[in-house]
Amino acid sequence: MLQSFNFTSQHASKRSSAVVKGWLAISGLALLSACSGFQQVQPGTSYSELVQRFGMPQQQCQSDSTAGGQILNWSGQPMGRFAWTAELDEAERVVSMQQMLSDTGFAKLNTGDWDQQRVACWFGRPALIEQARYQGKRHETWTYRYLQPAQYLAHFYIYFDESGQVRHFHPGPDPLEMNDGWFFRP
């Protein structure tokens, strides 16, 4: 039976905390097994094999680098820290499969022009969409949760101008993991 939780209270009961921790542990194991499955995908794997193994992708777009190809994305956001992206050729076979929510994946933003559609295709849906100031102007900001090296829990922020073009991006610590007295930590 599902338990309802009151997230407005500052302190959860020990019982509901144990239920949440148990659910998170089970969810974490499921995500780890899915992630390891993505790592096993080899070039040449067909679109139908991907869908059979991982379900329908959350994002499916035309490829910006492979003529006639597609980009497929399976994301664990908002709380998961993975977004696996497959680039397919015109025959609907995998050319590459990569975990985009990583320092290496985000480095792709340094190449070419990026708009919101291209970011969504490659990185999946963000964990959070907010308005933030950058260089004195308000920008729509997409936040992705991810793991930096040494399992450091982080956020990656992408700022878009009013036309939807990427103007700035950077990593930062995950505020939920900071134990500085500003955020509640059970």
Image: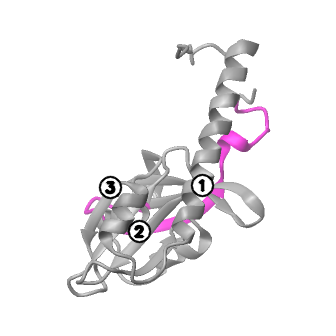
Disc ID at residue 33: 1
Under mark 2, the amino acid is Arg
Q: How many marks?
A: 3
Nearest-to-viewer mark from 1 and 2: 1
Instruction: Estimate the spatial distance between the alpha carbons at disc 3 and disc 2, rounded to whole Å.
Output: 31 Å
Instruction: Estimate the spatial distance between the alpha carbons at disc 1 and disc 2, rounded to whole Å.
Output: 35 Å
Q: Secondary structure at mark 3?
A: loop
Residue 125 position in % (x across, y down): 39, 53
Image-quadrant location for residue 94: bottom left
Identity of the residue drawn at 62% across and 13% down: 9
Q: Is residue 160 visible?
A: no
Residue 89 position in % (x across, y down): 29, 83
The answer to whether marks 1 and 2 mark residues whose Cβ atoms lie closer than 8 Å is no
Against 9, residue 69 (above or below) is below
Residue identifier under label 2:
167
Residue identifier under label 3:
56
Q: Nearer the viewer, residue 117 or 137?
A: 117
Q: Magenta residues, as a range? A: 159-183
